[in-house]
Image (cartoon, grey):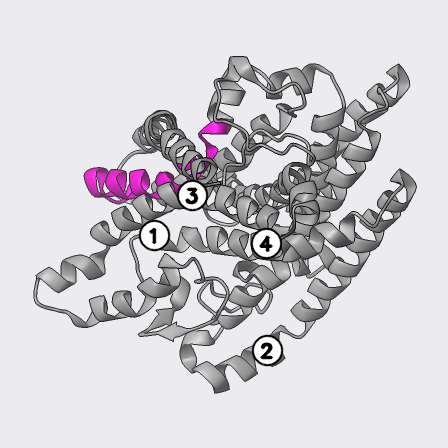
Amino acid sequence: MEALATPRPAHAASLPRPAAMSKIHPDAVPGLTGLRFLAAFSVLFAHAVAVLLQGHDYPGSVAYWCTQASGFGMTLFFVLSGFVIHYNYAGLVTGGRLRGIAAYLWARFARLYPLYLLTLLGYVLVSRRHFDFWFGDPAPFRDVLHALPYFLFSLQSWFYVPIGDTSLIYAVGGSTSITWSISTEWFFYLTFPLVAWLVLRSHSPRLTVALVLAWCVLWGALTTSLFDRALDLNTWAVERYGSVAEMRQPRDEFAAQDSYVFWLLSFSPYLRMGEFVLGSLIAQLYIQLRGRSAATLENALGTAAFVAAFVSLFVIGYFEFSPNVGVNVFRKMYMNFALAPSAALLIFCAARYRNVLSRLLTSRPALLLGDASYSIYLTHFLVLMVDFKLFGAPAQRGTAFNLFVLTATIVATLLLSIGLYAYYEAPTRKWLRRLWRDRA
């Protein structure tokens, strides 16, 4: 997922530089940078456990629960994206006319595409379909060529397209499927001018709070309603797209990841839009309250709300995935919106209130790793694939050695990501933004 720049207010006319942490803009919200790392690390840790501790992740085990952290990571990314984009760019896209929208889109292109294209190339090169081509079986690679235009234009999550024996998101192989979230983000970016115009209609904190609550109820009702119609959607999809689109799971509430139902409820931007809009509303509330310093009592209540939101993640996660719990409202939203209200509360409290938790999120290591969060997200599966090839299947190794490989893999991913951010991601973004400014 995207690692967002340390946010600056929507009225800032110039684009923020990828400056060192010692030069944070006075209007920045550095606590959100720490949350970006938390989101990226949740995805990294969950996928690392799933790949490197296979066989230990039976339902109810510690490894099983660890693998569910990726859902929280993605939701936190999407809500945080809505917050930061609205905070940074709402004024630019609504007041700068077409020129302002163009500057905003170029800034997002400079932020996402350099690393996205580099890692996409890496995943294609290590894809089994690529090796099959060189060993005399070109058919699978033709599927890659069919899918690549969608990936190059970051459209792969916008459409459900069967390609060969799988769906579009999985057609390239080499774990390029993780780029679905970048495609979904691009949909958010393109629709943001309209979102910003609507959100800015809220002129008072009370109205914004009411809109936040109403949005949570509305989107929760929409997502649970679609879940309740999953079997009907599955029947239609199989008739429309063939057996590739089928859920193919013994429990109806859990769909196969290349099925139409999973695409619609989890990968597609149309259902994940709820998280982005919620983040934009939270940013509007933060901007409206920014001029009012938080009193001691409010700060204490905000700290308690932060802790409560964090605890709620585990409670809701239990209802989402526990094998001992039947179908419930949270399980119906496990593919999209279940954790979004908790993530929104975390973000708002981290932005507004000062306490030991916010100081932890603004520590130098948290800021450094938060800056590298986009690299962490896009490169972690490459490292996992290399480790799996080097050390073999986890079932062939002892538990102690598996835990050692898991730890070493996480450390290697973090170090690689910091290097990529410092020597490739930030310089290329700065260069591309300079091109825009020079041309302007």
Cα–Cα span, label 1 and label 4: 23 Å
Evaluate if marks 2 and 4 touch, with contact meaning CB atoms under 8 Å apart.
no
Q: Which residue is mark 3?
A: 47
Q: Which residue is mark 2?
A: 233
Q: Position of residue 14 (x, y in %)?
A: 58, 32
Task: Describe residue 279's horizontal placement relative to residue 417 as left or right.
Answer: right
Whichever of callouts 1 and 2 sits on the residue coming sooner in the sequence is 1
Q: Is residue 159 above or below residue 62?
A: below
Label 2 CA crowd tier, 10 Å (few <14, some 14–19, many 20+): some
Whichever of callouts 2 and 4 sits on the residue coming sooner in the sequence is 4
Q: Which mark is residue 175?
A: 1
User: Of helix, strand and loop, which one carries label 2?
Assistant: helix
Cα–Cα span, label 2 and label 4: 24 Å
Cα–Cα span, label 4 and label 3: 25 Å
Q: Hey, what amino acid is under mark 1?
A: Ser
From which residue to which does the magenta span run? 371-394
Q: Please tell me which residue lies in front, 320 or 127.
A: 127
Which residue ends up furthest to the top in the rendered image?
22
Q: Is residue 25 magenta?
A: no
Q: Which mark is residue 188?
A: 4
Whichever of callouts 3 and 1 sits on the residue coming sooner in the sequence is 3
Whether residue 53 is visible here, answered yes or no, is no
Whether residue 431 is visible here, answered yes or no, is yes
Closer to viewer: mark 3 or mark 1: 1
User: Of helix, strand and loop, which one carries label 1?
Assistant: loop
Closer to viewer: mark 1 or mark 4: 4
Q: Hey, what amino acid is under mark 4?
A: Phe
Evaluate if marks 4 and 3 touch, with contact meaning CB atoms under 8 Å apart.
no
Q: Hey, what amino acid is under mark 2?
A: Leu
